[in-house]
């Protein structure tokens, strides 16, 4: 009996003892990886970047990592125990596999951090897969270090795990470790909430915790936010100024023309050409000497003979914001206006100047599909898009990576292609929007030998050791500035030889700052130069007042209306105002920025700057920021920002920018069909009618069809467009597939009728259920209208 009792006792105690030993082993093994990965992060950042406060930030960060890790293990101990008792065969192994998987993910997240010293954030989910693949292929990232680190991690986990199970730790009993873990978690939370540590935040933060926390926050915030419409209705009260029309349309206001630009110009009777030169990653300080080296002497000299705004702001950290803000001053959508799949009708420089007989062209040295630029400009009925696929064959392609991925063209070739294309259009009134690319990843220059030699010569003039280290570390970025500046110098030299040079207005700015280089403070990431040059300029002038990309739209429309009596819209939805022509600093503005994560969390208002919706600063005329602690001001700005954000979303996503009738009244286009259904439509019919027009003029039309697909895109019907005679004989059929990778989508189609002698035709649009399966969709909007220009 005694012998049997011992066997039973051993049998009942063994699982309890085993799970404790295994859990202690897992805790210690994970803690070792946490320490090693922090050391790896420190060493790699030191070698690649040598940022300020590195050692202190990583040391404090390691302490926080250990507190967080112990706290998490304390929380999950009951789950591990339960798995040992009830899922003994696979439960513990699955738990340990998940822990190691999270360690591998942490390693990959750290590797992303090494690209620009910026932690991975929710912007990961704002990119199309094609855009992400393009960015990776053209980034110049090497995967050798990543693959090596992964192999070492897998090997170390396997070997150490086996060793620790053979020789388990017995330093502390599990109960004490878990109690310590609870205390650690409390300490971690309190330090995050209240401590002000002397660290660089991006270095200090645990990169995985930062990413997962923000993903959770972003995913859950929409469930607790007040309804968009309710907040949006408060916009006009919180942001008074323009003569608003209707609270339902928060940004819609009467357009008031006020022209300051023409006072600085010797104008001709013929309206000038407008050339907008949007320069990739052009920070304001680039055009001045940097630590003793002048990388962009031409643009610097040009700014001194131009109208120049040094305190000018882009509205986003990436190029998704620059195009729509400069050309239309529209709201931000959910993650950038151009990145939306469905656009509301809006006024822009393109469609307004088109009404005044301007020819509009967008020029881009890369693929115009990137960041949805092509869809945006086509929706604005631009006359032509010239991108990398339209270049003449004698220009040299820029290929990157081992697979020699075709990225685009260097800025020098880009400007030459532009001059060549417009050479035959010198007598045509034009709006030309050019977007450069050399000063963007992969940072490839046209003549590496020449620019390396020039860099070496300039570096020899520098005596400060830290400055030398800075330039050497960021050499490939600075080399592109030489190249971009030379491209501009050659562009203007060649333009001067042309007849249309004298009557052209040039607007030069940056789309955003170069994120690969360190910045002085948080607001500098939005600061770009703004240069207005014309041979007809009366005198150069520098203006220190704050202005933004969103101010260009109404500035140009005011100029053309008052000086050339252009036909411009009576109403505006511009989020900006007019460019401020004040030579002294003037910071009386409200400016909302969209950050790298496609979030509206940075907000400037009349001398105060709210960063990340958490940190409040005072802005000084020299663009210096000083953090302040003013709870009332912080709460006030947070409230206004939440209202602005709601208004932006409501106007963008719910067709609350302006009534369609206002847009078409200006363009004087006849609407044949207009229907918007917000209900959910479910069907398994072989054919479903979307639009039917019994009499339509025999001339080109536009058809805009948008919807929200609630079925699997693979099962969604085709779109069939049919032209018919008045006797119902089919003249032409067009079949379009719904994109497989889209939930929301908008077709903007320019359709030419088939050749026939009939003056009127019948027209219809149907959904054809090719799979004979049930499908459903909502928010169907269909407009058919004539082409008038």
Image: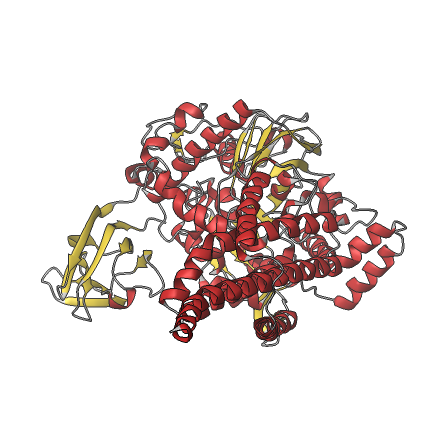
Residue 530 against residue 120 in the figure, above or below: above
Residue at 58%, 62% in the rendered image: 30
Report the side of 640 relative to 729 (left or right). right
* Residue at 56% from the left image edge and 68% from the top image edge: 137
Q: Is residue 568 left or right of residue 494?
A: left
- Residue 784: x percent and y percent? 25, 51
Residue 584: image location, x then y, percent: 68, 25
Q: Is residue 516 left or right of residue 91?
A: right
Residue 310 in view of the camera: yes
Tell me, what colour scheme is on the image? Answer: secondary structure
Question: Which quadrant of the figure contains the N terminus?
Answer: bottom left
Identify the image quadrant of residue 720.
Answer: bottom left
- For this orientation, the residue located farthest to the front is 1
Q: How many marks?
A: 0
Q: Residue placed at 50% from the left, 27% from the top?
A: 635
In the image, residue 727 sits, relative to residue 571, either above or below, namely below
The image position of residue 457, as x and y in percent, is 87, 59
> What is the residue that sits farthest to the left in this orientation?
727
Q: Is residue 390 visible?
A: no
Q: Is residue 290 above or below residue 13?
A: above
Residue at image coords 65%, 59%: 35
């Amino acid at each position: 009996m005694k012998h049997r009792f011992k066997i039973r006792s051993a049998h009942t105690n063994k699982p309890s003892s085993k799970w404790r030993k295994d859990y202690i082993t897992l805790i210690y093994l994970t803690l070792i990886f946490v320490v090693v990965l922090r050391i790896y992060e420190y060493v790699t950042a030191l070698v690649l970047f040598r940022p300020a406060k590195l050692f202190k930030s990583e040391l404090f960060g390691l302490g926080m990592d250990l507190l967080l890790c112990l706290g998490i293990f304390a929380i999950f101990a009951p789950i591990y125990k339960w798995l040992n008792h009830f899922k003994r065969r696979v439960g513990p192994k699955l738990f340990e596999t998940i822990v190691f998987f999270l360690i591998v993910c942490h390693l990959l997240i750290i590797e992303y951090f090494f690209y620009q010293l910026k932690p991975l954030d929710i912007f990961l989910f704002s990119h199309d897969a094609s855009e992400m693949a393009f960015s990776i292929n053209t980034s110049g990232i090497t995967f050798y270090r990543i693959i090596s680190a992964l192999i070492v991690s897998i090997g170390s986990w396997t070997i150490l795990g086996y060793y620790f199970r053979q020789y388990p730790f017995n330093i502390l009993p599990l109960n004490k470790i878990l109690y310590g873990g609870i205390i650690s978690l409390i300490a971690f939370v309190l330090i995050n909430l209240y401590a002000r540590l002397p660290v660089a935040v991006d270095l200090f933060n645990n990169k995985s915790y930062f990413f997962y926390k923000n993903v959770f926050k972003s995913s859950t915030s929409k469930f607790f936010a007040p309804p968009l419409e309710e907040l949006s209705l408060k916009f006009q009260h919180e942001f008074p100024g323009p003569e608003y029309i209707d609270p339902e349309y928060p940004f819609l206001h009467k357009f008031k023309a006020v022209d300051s630009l023409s006072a600085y110009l010797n104008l001709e009777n013929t309206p000038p050409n407008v050339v907008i030169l949007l320069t990739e990653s052009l920070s304001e300080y680039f055009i001045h000497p940097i630590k003793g080296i002048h990388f962009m002497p031409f643009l610097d000299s040009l700014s001194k003979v131009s109208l120049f705004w040094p305190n000018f702001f882009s509205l986003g950290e990436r190029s998704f914001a620059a195009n729509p803000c400069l050309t239309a001053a529209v709201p931000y959508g959910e993650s950038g206006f151009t990145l939306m799949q469905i656009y509301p009708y809006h006024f822009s420089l393109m469609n307004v100047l088109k009404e005044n007989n301007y020819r509009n062209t967008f020029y881009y040295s890369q693929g115009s599909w990137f960041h949805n630029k092509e869809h945006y400009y086509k929706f604005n009925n631009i006359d032509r898009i010239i991108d990398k696929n339209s270049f003449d064959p004698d220009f040299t392609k820029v290929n990157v990576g081992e697979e020699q991925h075709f990225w685009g063209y260097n800025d020098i070739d880009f400007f030459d292609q532009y001059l060549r294309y417009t050479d035959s259009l010198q007598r045509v009134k034009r709006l030309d929007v050019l977007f450069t690319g050399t000063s963007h990843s992969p940072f490839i220059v046209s003549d590496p030998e020449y620019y390396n030699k020039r860099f070496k010569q300039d570096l020899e003039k520098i005596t400060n050791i830290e400055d030398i280290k800075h330039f050497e570390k960021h050499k490939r970025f600075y080399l592109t500035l030489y190249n971009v500046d030379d491209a501009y110098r050659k562009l203007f030299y060649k333009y001067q030889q042309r007849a249309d040079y004298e009557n052209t207005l040039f607007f030069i700015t940056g789309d955003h700052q170069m994120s690969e280089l360190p910045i002085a403070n948080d607001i500098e990431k939005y600061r770009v130069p703004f240069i207005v040059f014309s041979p007809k300029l009366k005198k150069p002038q520098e203006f220190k007042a704050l202005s933004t990309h969103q101010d260009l739209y109404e500035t140009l429309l005011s100029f053309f209306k008052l000086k050339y009596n252009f036909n411009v819209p009576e109403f505006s939805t511009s989020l900006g105002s007019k460019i401020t022509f004040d030579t002294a600093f003037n910071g009386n503005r409200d400016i909302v920025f969209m950050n790298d994560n496609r979030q509206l969390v940075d907000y400037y208002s009349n001398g105060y700057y709210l960063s990340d919706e958490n940190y409040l600063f005072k802005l000084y005329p020299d663009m210096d920021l000083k953090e302040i602690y003013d709870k009332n001001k912080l709460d006030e700005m947070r409230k206004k920002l939440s209202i602005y954000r709601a208004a932006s979303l409501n106007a963008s996503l719910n067709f609350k920018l302006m009534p369609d009738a206002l847009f078409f009244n200006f363009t004087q286009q006849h609407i044949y069909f207009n229907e918007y259904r917000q209900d959910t439509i479910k069907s398994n019919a072989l054919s479903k009618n979307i639009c039917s027009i019994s009499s339509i003029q025999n001339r080109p039309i536009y058809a805009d069809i948008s919807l929200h697909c609630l079925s699997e895109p693979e099962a969604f019907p085709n779109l069939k467009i049919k032209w018919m005679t008045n006797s119902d004989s089919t003249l032409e059929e067009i079949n379009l597939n719904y994109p497989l990778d889209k939930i929301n989508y908008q077709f903007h189609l320019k359709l030419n009728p088939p050749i026939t002698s009939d003056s009127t035709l019948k027209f219809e649009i149907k959904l054809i259920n090719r799979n004979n399966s049930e499908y459903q969709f909502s928010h169907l909007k269909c407009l058919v209208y004539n082409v008038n220009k």
